[in-house]
Image (cartoon, rainbow, N blue to C red):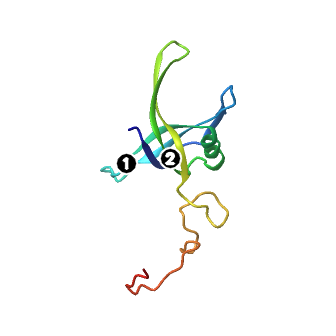
Amino acid sequence: MNKVILMGRLTRDPELRYTPSNVATCSFSVAVDRRYKSSDGTTPADFINCVAWRNTAEFISKYFTKGARILVTGSIQTRTYDDKEGQRRYVTEVVVDEAEFCESKRNDGGSFGGGQPAGGAQEGYYPIDDDDSVPF
């Protein structure tokens, strides 16, 4: 089975292109934090190249920009090609099947943020009394 699930931040704006037969393709890179902190207190990250095709490519290029948090699912693909000097190059990338938002827009109309509007309360959620009873 070849299944990849990544959640991270875009390291650059997605690059949308079209093939000669007018098929959309979008290339981007996702910075994915590792699950530990190094001895100096920083969290190392892996920078993973991704490519999406057709509607998924157009969706990503339209709604995501550098720094936006994204969740992608897909599969790992390897390929080779010869560069202009005749050198054989090897590429490993994630072919994205689905992409999802991981943050909501801020209420002030700004770009993607931390998911909570100013004031601490999330829109649509209200504090409830904690009386240790379950309503179902």
Q: Which residue is mark 1?
A: 34
Circle 2: residue type: Val
Residue drawn where x is 51% and y is 38% of the image: 50
Q: Position of residue 8 (x, y in %)?
A: 48, 49
Please name which of the two marks, 1 or 2, marks the residue nearer to the observer: 2
Mark 2 residue element:
strand
Rendered image quadrant of residue 27: top right
Residue drawn where x is 61% and y is 64% of the image: 106
Q: Position of residue 99 (x, y in %)?
A: 54, 48
Q: Earlier in the sequence, mark 1 or mark 2?
A: 1
Q: Position of residue 46 (x, y in %)?
A: 42, 42
Numbered label attached to residue 97 = none
Residue at far top of view:
86
When the figure is inspected, residue 24 is found, relative to residue 128, above or below; the finding is: above
When the figure is inspected, residue 60 is found, relative to residue 133, above or below; the finding is: above
Cα distance in 3D space between marks 1 and 2: 16 Å
Residue drawn where x is 32% and y is 49% of the image: 38
Numbered label attached to residue 72 = 2
User: How many badges with numbers are in the image?
Assistant: 2
Q: Position of residue 133 (x, y in %)?
A: 39, 85
Mark 1 residue element:
loop
